[in-house]
Image (tube, helix red, strand yellow):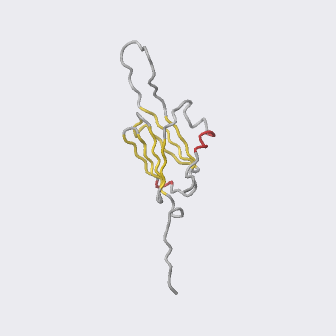
Amino acid sequence: MTKPIDVAVEKNRDPRETPESYFVPATDVYETAEELTLVAEMPGVRPEGLAVTVEDNVLVIHGKPEGREAPAGELLLKEFEVGEFYRAFQLPADYDTEKIEAGIRQGVLTLHLPKSDRLKPRRIEVKAE
């Protein structure tokens, strides 16, 4: 298998398009003969707070979690942080970006990136002469 995505694009991100500070979601990427599946943890993010875009073969995931109300009283200890999630991946050219499917369930985003027919294995029929 080849290296399906390149995470180095994050280092060269356009600051106009990314939040000033953000969390990088933990991400797993799986490859089959048919597709890549990307799974990213984005707790507190609902579908309406999520943007998944592809431009020039750069896949960008940007999620804004719902705010949470602080209980009444004086704050004595603060360890819980809420912030935006951002992650970008450079995709090879041979993925069908028009057919990417995305879903989020219980704070876990799952993307299905189908391979173009050029990348899919195929069987060649051998004819007898």
Foreground of the two, 105 or 97:
105
Q: Position of residue 84 (x, y in %)?
A: 49, 32
Give the farthest residue toward the bottom. Answer: 129
Residue 91 located left or right of residue 72: right
Q: Which quarter of the figure is the N terminus placed in?
A: bottom right
Residue 37 located left or right of residue 17: left
Foreground of the two, 120 or 44:
120
Give the farthest residue toward the right. Answer: 12
Residue at horizontal 51%, vertical 54%? 97
Residue at horizontal 36%, vertical 15%? 72
Q: How many marks?
A: 0
Q: Position of residue 7 (x, y in %)?
A: 58, 44
Residue at horizontal 41%, vertical 28%? 67
Q: Position of residue 55 (x, y in %)?
A: 56, 48
Q: Position of residue 52 (x, y in %)?
A: 48, 44
Give the farthest residue toward the top. Answer: 74
Foreground of the two, 41 or 61:
41
